[in-house]
Image (tube, coloured by chain):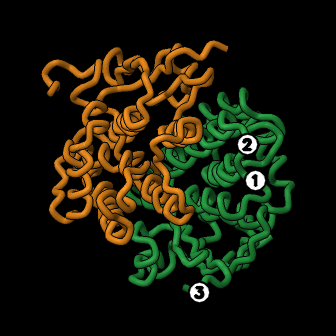
Chain colours: A green, B orange
Amino acid sequence: MQAGKPILYSYFRSSCSWRVRIALALKSIDYETVPINLIKDQGQQFSQEFQALNPMKQVPTLKIDGITISQSLAIIEFLEETRPTPRLLPQDPKKRAQVRMISDTIASGIQPLQNLSILKQVGQENQLTWAQKVIHTGFNALEQILRSTAGKYCVGDEVSMADLCLVPQVANAERFKVDLTPYPTISRINKTLLALEAFQVSHPCRQPDTPPELRA
Amino acid sequence: MQAGKPILYSYFRSSCSWRVRIALALKSIDYETVPINLIKDQGQQFSQEFQALNPMKQVPTLKIDGITISQSLAIIEFLEETRPTPRLLPQDPKKRAQVRMISDTIASGIQPLQNLSILKQVGQENQLTWAQKVIHTGFNALEQILRSTAGKYCVGDEVSMADLCLVPQVANAERFKVDLTPYPTISRINKTLLALEAFQVSHPCRQPDTPPELRA
């Protein structure tokens, strides 16, 4: 099987795609983007062609080393195991557990409950209230967790997978007009991370499929 | 810090708790169960005491080696790193990616959308339809993925973390009266796994907090 340059199926605004884009940027992995527009054409993720790559009909999906991987954290763990530098998981198993706990709190406990397909089912008039409630519940927990794990970043002073989950989730919170005042630790870490180049080049406002009016 | 015997905060019916119970059983780790009844006393997970352990107010939570870990997959990865035998992740990074992809498909893509707190918000009259729809969407994808990854179990012929996620999710599907006929691969693997001792001793019908009428 020809490996070639990795291909990331991504949507500029997808927070899960952003997680992977940050990992690729931090590890200096050159890749091509194939944009999958989740809204256009009634959702390009529902095409036969894309479903064959990812039966969950979600982004991101990464073709790399001759295989196709879906689920952002599974992708990041694969990148970590095959391209270990710079590392996104600490060496100490207890700290690794903290990183994964924070990552899963976002990836299983917050994001899925406020993603596009759920909001569609909730109905347009309830979307904002629903999303805000889900994010507040999650951020209350996260703020408390981070108070005991954080240094400069989510866990100590090294950028980790947890940070790759945090920043895109805060961006979602901002889109849903969540008041972030009650979350000073989350806000501080988010701001520090957004100053890093890998978080900037991977930002939704700078992707090949970012609409001109949202570019920055 | 005194480590002592690990303590698992668990609810007999929680599918995420079951995942961890299987891991503990497979790895022959002796532990104590502290039952957290998600329904009684308006939900024991909301007590101040439990919130201090797990700010997300969810089970499972594991106290082990002097730390407290929440999120079932983070717990299982920690057990895997600190108690590697028998392994729950294959050696080959590509197969590990498949295991994590399947695990995350369930842990982020299916279970959170049909768990107790979401069903409460959906309203009693819509619960069954909602849960069935979510599980059908997920199982359609999972069936397709497993057709290319499965051997005897989810990925090849070794029990892995993916199997620890599959069996409890199938049990949820059965509780919500999902017709499993369209999913022959899922059904076959589930049946094979349920014959293993670790899946039996960890089963919801055999926990310290299982009500007498549900015991088997």
SS category of the residue bearing label 1: loop
Q: Amino acid at mark 1?
A: Arg
Q: Between disc 3 and disc 2, whose residue precedes?
A: 3
Quadrant in the picture for the N terminus of chain B: top right
Q: Position of residue A61 (x, y in %)?
A: 54, 70
Q: Tell me the residue at 21%/44% (across/down).
A: B195
Q: Position of residue A150 (x, y in %)?
A: 76, 34
SS category of the residue bearing label 3: loop
Spatial CA span between label 3 and label 2:
33 Å
Q: Between disc 1 and disc 3, whose residue precedes?
A: 3
Left or right: B170 as drawn, with respect to B158: left
Nearer-the-camera pick, A44 or B103: B103
Say yes or no: labels 2 and 1 on the same chain: yes
Q: What is the chain identity of the residue bearing mark 2?
A: A
Whether residue B156 is situated above or below residue B65 in the rendered picture? below
Left or right: B3 as drawn, with respect to B179: right
Is disc 2 surrounded by few (<14), some (14 to 19) or many (20+) residues within 10 Å? Answer: few
Q: Amino acid at mark 2?
A: Gln
Q: In this orientation, does residue B105 appear?
A: yes
Q: Which residue is mark 2?
A: A91
Say yes or no: labels 3 and 2 on the same chain: yes
Q: Tell me the residue at 21%/57% (across/down).
A: B187
Q: Amino acid at mark 3?
A: Gln
Q: In this orientation, does residue A15 appear?
A: no
Q: What is the chain identity of the residue bearing mark 1?
A: A
Evaluate if marks 2 and 1 touch, with contact meaning CB atoms under 8 Å apart.
yes
Q: Position of residue A154 (x, y in %)?
A: 74, 40
Q: Tell me the residue at 26%/48% (across/down).
A: B193
Q: Which residue is mark 3?
A: A2
In the image, which disc is placed on residue A87?
1
Whether residue B29 is situated above or below residue B100 in the rendered picture? above
Q: Position of residue B29 (x, y in %)?
A: 44, 27
